[in-house]
Amino acid sequence: MSDELVAALDIGGTKIAGALVRETGALTVRARRATPARASGPTVMAAVRAVLDELTASPQWSRVVAVGIGSAGPVDASVGTVSPVNIPGWREYPLVSQVRQAVGGLPVTLVGDGVAMAAAEHWQGAARGCANALCMVVSTGVGGGLILDGRPHLGPTGNAGHIGHISVDLDGDPCPCGSQGCVERIASGPNIASRAVADGWRAGPEGAGAAAVAAAARAGDPVARASYERAAQALAAGIAATATLVEIELAVVGGGVAGAGEVLFAPLRRALRDYARLSFVRELSVVPAQMGTDAGLVGAAAAAARASDVAGFGAAAQTRSERCVGPRGPRRLGA
């Protein structure tokens, strides 16, 4: 086993996390800061640097050979910039050059957070062994990444699979991305909560976030349940459209909203039966993610290791397995 490490950053609208990652996917040193999402670009970068400072201060830093970044998007990996919808202070922000400067010139690889999550789930999680899958992060925003022909598919700029900004309601509400009726505008945690409140749901002492709405739905509140059912319908429409386009056989859903469990997954599976009607997508499965909050870090490390030819990292994700679990149990890939 190699003693080399890869440093990873997971940057989103709520938090900036960092870790040193072993070739097994295990995380060693960790650091975290809240994202000052409404602050200026330099202020957001200062939080990133604070995370990196903690990592570089570790005695283990001397073993780091590459750095991976999974960021809320859109990103442009071709030039190293990010323009996250939920971090308005970063528009075409030169994140890669800033991070490279902070880590002494080590190679830095940038991917969208959904691509990072997909790489992690394919390496060690719910999509392990699947040749063609969509992996989604449903949280403050909605992101996604694709596994095609047994490998993470990044696309030219690192945004392939960004399902959150597929429009599923032509007359829907405007989205911060500039379109309207996007999956994210309906199914993200803040939008689930805001719709419930607008429709008359009253928050209790636990607050008015998506988790509180899920708890109310679980207890039988019809307004809370309706908000989750609408979110599930938007997700199902986006998943079915993606499956029809590229013939995925599995959709993996993670992120904070997925923590609602069957409050989300039961209506999602029902809605998917209505949208995925063609013969070649009818057996599409939807399952919860397995990698939890570490998915972005593990996937960013795998992407960086692959880009820098670091041996061992993500090896399982590059090996096409014999079988993939579908709605009727394991089935041979390509069958």
Image: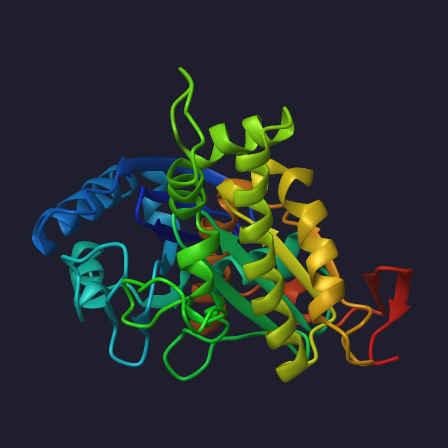
- 177 over 40 or under it: above or below: below
Residue at 38%, 52% in the rendered image = 8
Image quadrant in which you'd find residue 273: bottom right
Report if residue 26 is visible in the image.
Answer: no
Residue 277 lies left or right of residue 113; in this view the side is: right
Residue at 54%, 58% in the rendered image = 136
Q: Position of residue 267 (x, y in %)?
A: 68, 49
Q: Position of residue 194 (x, y in %)?
A: 37, 42
Image quadrant in which you'd find residue 277: bottom right
Along the viewing direction, whichever of 65 and 260 lies nearer the viewer = 260
Q: Position of residue 34 (x, y in %)?
A: 26, 37
Report if residue 173 is visible in the image.
Answer: yes
Query: Which quadrant, please, contains the C terminus?
Result: bottom right
Along the viewing direction, whichever of 42 and 308 lies nearer the viewer = 42
Q: How is the image coloured?
A: rainbow
- 75 over 122 or under it: above or below: below
* Residue furthest top in the image: 205
Along the viewing direction, whichever of 3 and 300 lies nearer the viewer = 300
- 322 over 252 or under it: above or below: below
What count of labels does the image hold?
A: 0
Along the viewing direction, whichever of 176 and 217 lies nearer the viewer = 217
* Residue furthest front in the image: 200
Q: Position of residue 128 (x, y in %)?
A: 71, 59
Residue at 55%, 33% in the rendered image = 214
Residue 78 lies left or right of residue 257; in this view the side is: left
Residue at 33%, 36% in the rendered image = 31
